[in-house]
Amino acid sequence: MSYRIAVRELCEFTAKCGDLDLRFVPSPTAQEGIAGHATVTARRGPAYEREVTLEGEYGVLRVRGRADGYDAVANRLEEIKTYRGDLARQPANHRSLHWAQARIYGWLLCKARGLSQIELALVYFDIVSQKETVLVETQRADELRRFFQAHCERFLAWAEQELTHVGHRDAALRALAFPFADFRMGQRELAEAVYKAACTGTQLLAQAPTGIGKTLATLFPQLKAMPGQQLDKVFFLAAKTPGRGLALEALERLRNAGATPLRTLELIAREKSCEHPDKACHGDSCPLAAGFYDRLPAARAAAVARQRLDRASVRELALAHAVCPYFLTQELARWADVVVGDYSYYFDTTALLHGLTQANGWRVCLLVDEAHNLLERGRGMYSAALDQRRFQALKQEAPAVLKKPLERLLRAWAEVHREQIVAYRVLPDLPNRLIGALQQLVGAINDHLAEQPEGLDSDWRTAYFDAMQFCRIAETFDTHSLIDCTLQPARTGRRPTSRLCLRNVVPGPFLAPRFAVARSAVLFSATLSPRGFYADTLGLDRGHWLEVRSPFQAEQLDVRVARHVSTRYADRERSIEPIVDLIAGQYQRRPGNYLAFFSSFDYLLQVQTRLAERHPHLPHWTQTRSMDEAAREAFLARFHAAGQGIGFAVLGGAFAEGIDLPGDRLIGAFVATLGLPQVNPVNEQLRDRLESLFGAGYDYAYLYPGLQKVVQAAGRVIRTPDDRGVVHLIDDRFAQPRVRRLLPGWWRIDMHTEPG
């Protein structure tokens, strides 16, 4: 059995040393890097070979990769690196890594073509000036062979350890049994479909009811398929923290059931894992960056011996070895069998897991939890916004070298909205002059950072990252997105300013290539209807669909429609009294724990205030804006089995999905809204674009997203086969046939309910 490794990954493991140092960053975007490579190779002669595939073996190692270019006439192999800033400030360990890659490619080429020596060149291409800096050395083949062997020797023991680990892991997974005596109703059906998708390499959209144990029903079959399909990794991607927690619990249960060797890793956002947020990421500032790569091998070895690598475990290990927890976690993603993290780690523009998958040629399977969230999250990942006021405020304290680029940007910006009268409009095309000025400003900031390693203040840093994101997204602009300009109120005597937004409408064109890289992808949720809507907007194949029959009976849930109440914005004042009567009446008939969902905090507070006035002895508690984690936990703690009262929450918020309150912890819900997005100029533009793309603008922009939130919220009530509860749908539109068809089929809806 051989161990496959890419040249770059081999060098990352064996050639990196010294400090973690992010000062010579950010590197160019992927598009800029591709364009830079193309520019360099286009300058070469007709004998120049591009993207030369090479491969070699050493012991159990099979090392492979693609050299950037080779000129047979000059006998010169080139390793091309794009960059910004002052090359003289590049850290020595970066340069050492690049030479290691060039020398290993050099040996592989010498071996493949029978060369006795070769000229190696590091070609550094400045994407701003378009100039090349070329560093050259000539090496004999026998010297390169020894270099290759030395690096392979450094990795060989680790590779043999990893092969042994995979053998033990696969043996354990083949023998793994489901950790319960039997599957719940619907759970086996879902598990079989997931297993089939993994084995056939297909995509699957699976709608499965809340409460059947979807997390375990997707992880178990995916792990069972791992040995037979020779999978390298499983990525469990969640929208929110509770989803990650459920996955980690399920993995621990599976480990206890026999999957003992399985390595599981939880990825945590940088801002939540940084030990020194007041320090910069380099050895001169942060003690955990100093000597990071020298201490990494011991930390890495200790980590993989633990198997379970959640946030607390990684932090403990990192601090014990004096390395950064965040970057240790990034390293461990290479060696974990199952990685649990946010959507962004695979789907974002610079996603870690996607990049590693491509670089290493991994065979991976994706499990996308609560996949109805991926539409809005995907839109956010491929959108970008700029606020003119933020850039204007930088003028006073701008370093001298940034004043002219900033002024050039502000002049171009003023031209964008000079003739604009309405507050909001969609631009017919990209403002190329502004984007060009923005790119120049980013380049100037990079040059400044190269000269001033202490960095930028927080305002400049925010503007800098906003500008880079805007430029990055502008490179991919197409019919899946729109660009709009919103005027902002002007101060007395000042000209108006504007906010520009590159707004993604359909993330499918961006997500589809990410799905294609994976061996299989399973997207699951309790609310993925209608399937055409999610397939279209997420870039999925419409053909592979599963709807798991609910294990719950209609008798378990009493669904009532308050058909004489309107919660439309114009009718809200009149709706308050009937809603208060309905809540109080239900509570009097059956005291217990309830959730009441509203379309906004303002609406929620109006009803809550009136309820408190008329029924002061009825216990209630309220979700507030910007609740921290402790406040959210306190809110949920009120829902204990012996508790009684009403929890007021916003539909689509933290308490409308992803929480589990079985039995008497929650016996009912009131949903006083259809959940439709607000009608405003932005959403109307989304509707128009979706209409032009799919012919279903209103449904795609308003109806389907709204009712998905309603069903999610109502799904909090029935969690187990023993639960009993009631859901009040408060709005006359719930009586419409087209709306009822989008509600779960197992619900038996009482259409004759009156409020009170």
Image (cartoon, rainbow, N blue to C red):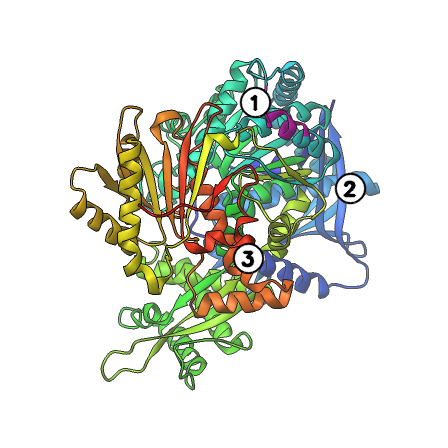
In magenta, the rendered stretch is: 183-192
**Who's the residue at 64% across and 50% down the image?**
535
- Nearer-N-terminus badge (2/3): 3
Q: Residue 184 carries which label?
A: 1
- Nearer-N-terminus badge (3/1): 3
- Residue placed under numbered mark 3 in the picture: 29
Q: Residue 409 carries which label?
A: none
x and y percentages locating residue 76 in the rendered image: 73, 52
- Residue placed under numbered mark 2 in the picture: 110
3 and 1 marks in contact (CB < 8 Å): no
The amino acid type, in three-letter code, at marker 3 is Thr
Q: Cα distance, mark 3 to mark 1?
A: 47 Å
Q: Cα distance, mark 2 to mark 3?
A: 32 Å
Q: Cα distance, mark 2 to mark 1?
A: 60 Å
The amino acid type, in three-letter code, at marker 2 is Cys
> In the displayed structure, would residue 363 be above or below residue 40?
above
The residue nearer to you, when weighing 186 against 457, is: 186
Mark 2, other Cα within 10 Å: few <14 / some 14–19 / many ≥20 = some
Q: Is residue 603 toward the left or the right of residue 437 in the image?
A: left
